[in-house]
Amino acid sequence: MTSATMDAKLKEAIPLYEKLKTEWGRKPPNVGKTDELLNLLKNLFAEGGFYPSDSNEDTRGLHIARDTLEIAAQCAIHKGDIPAFERALAQLKPFYFDLENRIPESPYRYLLLGLNLLCLLSQNRLAEFHTELELLSPKVIQTNPYIKHPVSLEQYLMEGSYNKVFLAKGNVPSPLFTFFMDILLNTIRDEIAFCMEKSYRQVSLNEAARILYLNNPDELAEIAKNHGWKLQSDKSFHFADNQIKHENEHVPADEIATQMIQYAREMEIII
């Protein structure tokens, strides 16, 4: 692409970019208008060569493209659109990790990388979570509040310290983290509910709310509905059917003992 063509696309993009910043900067942001401007700018970026490449020496377009994608990622969270957020992050990574020596670091870099980590954690994509973490320096992981938050959450989950995870919702480093925190907490509640119905014969309404870290009766009713729980006349959920099933299950102790003895004999032969 010729320099003249790139300059023409840049001149076309600048006023759209300024409008984008204005609409996104409103309190609250004008999400509809922002989304419309984002689509127009993304088309220009593709046509104008504003995305990272070895042949692109003009950093003006790179600045605009990066800033626009950062707004796109945040706008996606406001809309609750996880695929759009993930697409924006995928496009931002070259700006964050490949262009460090060409354009100044963005003030939103670690905010969005931290949100990406929390997004992965909320979907239990732990392998990808650790892969993304390996891209960051130990100092950043230990000191940056946007990165420390999801890292601490992952540690709490590994420990089974669910109470710490729920408490962490009140101490998020940015309001944008709340969206993925809600997804993570709902996932944890579903897991707790599954364990609860397998472990108890019955649980009172108040105790169920306490175990699930819920204060809202409507949220408890929604979980009960999803798990097929019925509130009985004594204001308790009964799980007797699950318990009866487990009590009737036969544990073949003699067979297990015989197998273990056979394994021990085979080990002696090998040694």
Image (cartoon, helix red, strand yellow):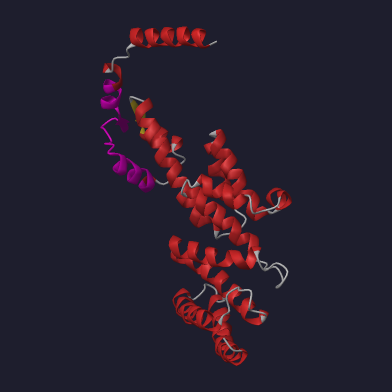
Depth check: give the residue in front, 15 or 222: 15
Residue at the image point whose x is 54% and y is 85% from the top: 16
Residue 199 appears in the rendering: yes
Q: Quadrant of the C terminus?
A: top right
Residue at the image point whose x is 51% and y is 51% from the top: 120
Residue 32 position, x and y percent, is: 44, 76
Vertical comparison of 41 with 216: above or below: below
Magenta range is: 218-245
Q: Quadrant of residue 109?
A: bottom right
Residue 252 position, x and y percent, is: 32, 12
Q: Quadrant of residue 176?
A: bottom right
Q: Is residue 65 magenta?
A: no
Residue 214 appears in the rendering: no
Depth check: give the residue in front, 10 or 15: 10
Residue 218 position, x and y percent, is: 36, 48
Residue at the image point whose x is 49% and y is 61% from the top: 86
Q: Is residue 228 magenta?
A: yes
Residue 161 position, x and y percent, is: 55, 35
Q: In the picture provided, is 234 more to the left or to the right than 260?
A: left
Vertical comparison of 28 with 20: above or below: above
Depth check: give the residue in front, 267 or 250: 267
Vertical comparison of 173 with 124: above or below: below
State the count of labels.
0
Q: In the picture provided, is 270 more to the left or to the right than 223?
A: right
Q: Quadrant of the N terminus?
A: bottom right
